[in-house]
Image (cartoon, rainbow, N blue to C red):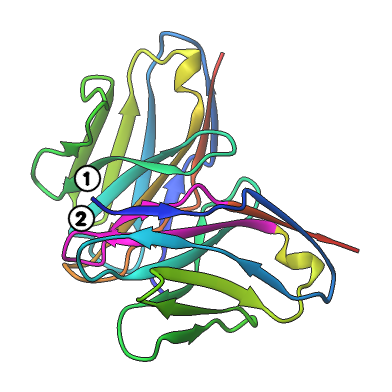
Amino acid sequence: AQSVTQLDSQVPVFEEAPVELRCNYSSSVSVYLFWYVQYPNQGLQLLLKYLSGSTLVKSINGFEAEFNKSQTSFHLRKPSVHISDTAEYFCAVSRGSGTYKYIFGTGTRLKVLA
Amino acid sequence: GAVVSQHPSRVICKSGTSVKIECRSLDFQATTMFWYRQFPKQSLMLMATSNEGSKATYEQGVEKDKFLINHASLTLSTLTVTSAHPEDSSFYICSAIQGVNTEAFFGQGTRLTVV
């Protein structure tokens, strides 16, 4: 069975500092990996995804994540955070052979401090 | 990207009543839609998978008679919470895909409060 672990439930960080949100997964088959962001009382927005190809994927707002097969990780990083990055971040892995069923991690609340 | 819309975004209902939540794919035909439930400060838990024109497939532990799902068209799926109780209060999110092996798009969620 597949599972996703986000060890950090909360990550406080000062504005303009770098941040890393950790995500580890377990799976006996090839997976697709996703990071979603959720702002208060809103749905999920796709931040970035890894399906195949380059193991380093980037979003338009400065986030990046690297798929590391040997460490079964897909950590999310940003070199300099903004107040507006304060949100809940969910790592997800596809379930089954398709990319449409997801298993979500428990989420990491990123709080950017002024 | 494709847009999935949920309605209503918030609903308050009395205990014992039923409430319907709609999930619409606005600019694509969704062959499959998914319903998730999110408890406060927790992750999303898949409740059921619905395919257009067929019965929904429920995840283990989800009461199918309580959470009625209808996927009557390629752009609309509904979740009806029947005989709602305060413990049904939660954030419900749907997602939709256009075909197999494609990305899922999520709605903005519906916050249900049962009083």
Which element is circle 1 on? strand
Q: Amino acid at mark 2?
A: Thr
For the point 56% across and 71% down, the residue is A76
Q: Nearer the viewer, residue A46 or B76?
A: A46
Reply yes or no: does residue B88 show up in magenta. no
Residue farthest along the top direction in this orientation:
B16
Q: Nearer the viewer, residue B75 or B98?
A: B98
- List x then y, in percent, for residue B20: 37, 30
For the point 27% across and 27% down, the residue is B62
Residue that carries the numbered disc 2 in the rendered image:
B32
Which element is circle 2 on? strand
- List x then y, in percent, for residue A46: 48, 68
The label number, if any, that marks residue B49 in the structure image: 1
Q: Quadrant of residue B95?
A: bottom left
Q: Which residues are magenta?
A: A87-107
Mark 1 and 2 residues: CB-CB less than 8 Å, in contact? yes
Most common SS among magenta residues: strand
